Image: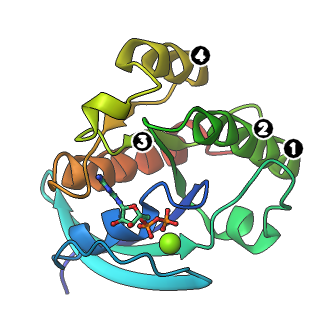
Amino acid sequence: MTNLLDRNVVVLGGIGVGKSTAIQRFLGNEFTDRYQPTVKNTYNKKVAVGKVEYNLSIIDTAGQDETSLLDSSYVGAADVYVIAFSVTFRKSFEIAQVIRDKILDMSGTETVAMVLVGNKSDLSNERQISKSEAEKVAKSFACPYIETSAKENLNIDQVFVNSVKIANGARAGGAS
Ligand code: GDP
Ligand code: MG
């Protein structure tokens, strides 16, 4: 038997920020410009981080706004969250922060194992959130910030590799 460890990654964020597109990129599928509303989908992919191979379960979600209730089944299932926004849409950046607050409320913990993702970095003319502004917020959350373009397939793999590392860190640090 090989060493295959399961990790559940839940992808959250505002509607239209590119969650599904980024996941499809990670799975090796082509970029499409078509917008397809997501209800909830789970995908599996094996990924090696260091010498260990992981079986990632990636949960794609419908997308949230400030008022939507987070499905408690996500909060129970996640080893780590990928919380995504679009660098072209300030509202989605605010929603990302609200989502983190909701996870904290629901989990009753003081930290969230998460990666903050600013997608659509290819749309530089439409940018509303600078890298430094997002980095500041990520620092206050003690999480990595990664800028991606799902369209240009930039940094997508890093998001999921980092999510495994963060999940592992949370397991090691949160053992009780
Ligand atoms: P979701 O609601 O977060 O799952 O968003 P989707 O993945 O469905 O993407 C919403 C729209 O944004 C689609 O038309 C995508 O083609 C587009 N999109 C996603 N990622 C990018 C990106 O990195 N750059 C650009 N320019 N468009 C993107
Ligand atoms: Mg979607």
The residue at which mark 4 appears reads as 140
On residue 101, the disc is 2
- The percent position of residue 162, horizontal first and vertical second, equals 32, 45
Q: Quadrant of residue 12?
A: bottom right
Q: Residue at x 75, y 74 (%)?
A: 73
Of circles 3 and 1, the one toward us is 3
Of circles 2 and 3, the one toward us is 3
Sequence-first disc among 3 and 4:
3
| 87 displayed left or right of 55 | right
- Disc 1 residue type (three-letter): Asp
Sequence-first disc among 3 and 1:
1
The residue at which mark 3 appears reads as 117
- Disc 2 residue type (three-letter): Asp
For the residue carrying disc 1, how many other residues have a C-alpha within 10 Å: few (<14), some (14-19), or many (20+)? Answer: few
Q: Residue at x 31, y 36 (%)?
A: 147
The residue at which mark 1 appears reads as 105
Q: Rounded to the nearest whole Å, what is the CA distance between mark 4 and mark 1?
A: 17 Å
Of circles 2 and 1, the one toward us is 2
- The percent position of residue 171, horizontal first and vertical second, equals 52, 48
26 up-or-down from 114: above or below: below
**Are the residues at dot 3 and dot 4 in contact (C-beta closer than 8 Å)?**
no
- Disc 3 residue type (three-letter): Val
| 173 displayed left or right of 66 | left
